[in-house]
Image (cartoon, rainbow, N blue to C red):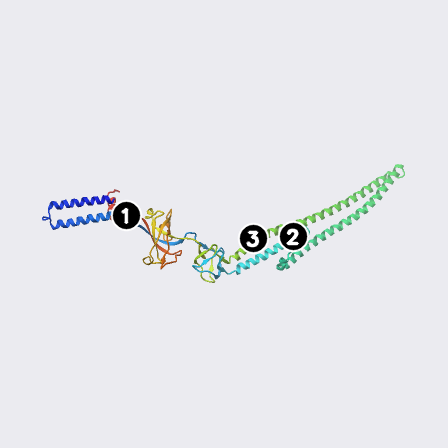
């Protein structure tokens, strides 16, 4: 391009010289001399404007952000602030205490659930021992915290066992009574049987009338029936005794199932309450640097899910996140050089940071003011220094960025409005 412009300039100069030669020096007027000077000036300016170039810059506002996701600490239940352990700018380790909440409510809830859990545990152990027919065993640690509950459960087991024992003793008494009756009936049956035998013999010999034989048979049948009734009564008592034992066992199993289910629920409730109690001390989930503490008042109330502390993860590089006008985004490409000017440090004193475009947003976003822009992330190639010392650069700092989108000649810049006007003029709606 430059060779073409130089050639055109050379031809224009030759033409001007020929023009002045034809008119002669003595006949040249002041007006022609002035026009000549203007002509040469225009030629010179056009040559300079066509050759000289300047950077085509796309500017935007930016802020410093961490390359890793900023960790925002929240609390599920919220609470009352008891103590604040950190402030902005301090380094924290994994698990370090950030803020302590008043544990009164969560601690009371945990103790209540734990007490219910211990009582349910004692009940399950007592019922398990009852079902197995053995004495329940409770360790010393459990006795130390719940001796009265253990005594109550043992009394319940003892009372139920006593009721079963009384029922079984009653059945045994009835069985013994029936067995005594059966023994008497057996003796009577033996006598009736012998008497029947004698009478039947006498009737056959004609020594007794036939009516006596009928009477003897009737007495024998009645005695046998009575013995059978007693045996049936004994079997009935034994069946009732067996049913009582089965009902006793079923009752224990039913209570054991319900108690085990309740114990499982209470175990979960205790774990939840314990977690809630542990969460009364809010700890850092990562190692890093505290960026911001939202809660600054002891005694203040933290609502559920409110942001409490922001932490920049350790070893997280700092980037510049810039807002670029949608009209300019077409000229922005990854890898382009950029100049980064932190608002905190006067660039006329501390200089500017060089960097490059890393990521260009794939779609525009709208901020809370309704303005639309593209987000572009830039990586700084160095650090701000002063007298050999590195100056601190922190997330949230603002900056002005200039992205070098390319080169443009002065002539192209000056002719751009004319080109746009002509383009619009020769169009028809």
* Quarter assignment of residue 193: top right
* Quarter assignment of residue 212: top right
* Quarter assignment of residue 271: bottom right
Marker disc for residue 127? 2
Marker disc for residue 268? 3
Query: Cα distance, mark 1 to mark 2?
Result: 91 Å
Residue that label 1 marks: 408
Q: Quadrant of the N terminus?
A: top left
Label 1 or label 2, whichever comes before in sequence order: 2
Coordinates of residue 372 in the picture (x, y in percent): 35, 50
Q: Residue furthest front?
A: 388
Q: Quadrant of the C terminus?
A: top left
Coordinates of residue 92 in the picture (x, y in percent): 46, 57
Q: Is residue 218 above or below residue 156?
A: above
Label 1 or label 3, whichever comes before in sequence order: 3
User: Given this view, does label 1 or label 2 mark the residue nearer the observer?
Assistant: 1
């Amino acid at each position: 391009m430059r060779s073409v412009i130089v050639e055109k300039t050379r031809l224009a100069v030759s033409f001007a010289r020929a023009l002045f030669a034809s008119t002669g020096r003595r006949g040249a007027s002041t007006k022609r001399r002035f026009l000549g000077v203007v002509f040469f000036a225009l030629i010179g300016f056009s040559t300079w404007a066509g050759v000289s170039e300047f950077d085509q810059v796309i500017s935007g506002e930016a802020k410093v952000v961490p390359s890793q996701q900023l960790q925002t600490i929240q609390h599920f239940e919220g609470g009352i602030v008891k103590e604040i352990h950190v402030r902005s700018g301090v380094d924290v380790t994994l698990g370090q205490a950030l803020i302590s909440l008043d544990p009164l409510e969560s601690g009371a809830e945990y103790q209540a659930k734990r007490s219910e859990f211990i009582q349910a545990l004692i009940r399950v152990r007592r019922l398990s021992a009852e079902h197995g027919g053995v004495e329940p065993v409770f360790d010393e640690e459990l006795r130390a915290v719940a001796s009265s509950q253990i005594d109550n459960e043992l009394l319940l087991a003892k009372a139920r066992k006593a009721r079963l024992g009384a029922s079984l003793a009653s059945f045994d008494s009835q069985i013994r009574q029936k067995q005594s009756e059966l023994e008497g009936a057996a003796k009577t049956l033996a006598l009736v049987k012998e008497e029947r035998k004698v009478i039947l013999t006498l009737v056959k010999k004609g020594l007794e009338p036939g009516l006596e034989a009928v009477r003897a048979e009737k007495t024998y049948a009645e005695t046998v029936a009575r013995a059978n009734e007693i045996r049936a009564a004994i079997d009935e008592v034994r069946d009732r005794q067996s049913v009582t034992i089965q009902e006793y066992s079923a009752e224990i199993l039913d209570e054991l199932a319900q108690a085990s289910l309740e114990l499982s629920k209470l175990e979960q409730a205790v774990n939840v309450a314990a977690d809630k109690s542990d969460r009364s001390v809010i700890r850092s989930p990562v190692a890093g640097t505290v960026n911001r503490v939202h809660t600054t008042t002891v005694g203040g109330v933290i609502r559920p899910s409110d942001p409490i502390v922001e932490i920049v993860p350790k070893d997280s590089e700092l980037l510049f996140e810039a807002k670029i006008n949608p009209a300019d985004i077409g000229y922005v490409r990854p890898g382009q050089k950029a100049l980064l000017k932190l608002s905190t440090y006067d660039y006329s004193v501390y200089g500017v940071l060089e960097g490059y475009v890393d990521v260009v947003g794939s779609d525009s976003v709208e901020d809370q003011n309704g303005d639309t822009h593209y987000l572009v992330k830039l990586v700084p190639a160095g650090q701000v220094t002063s007298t050999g010392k590195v100056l601190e650069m922190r997330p949230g700092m603002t900056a002005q960025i200039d992205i070098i989108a390319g080169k443009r000649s002065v002539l192209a810049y000056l002719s751009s409005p004319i080109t746009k006007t002509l383009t619009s003029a020769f169009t028809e709606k």
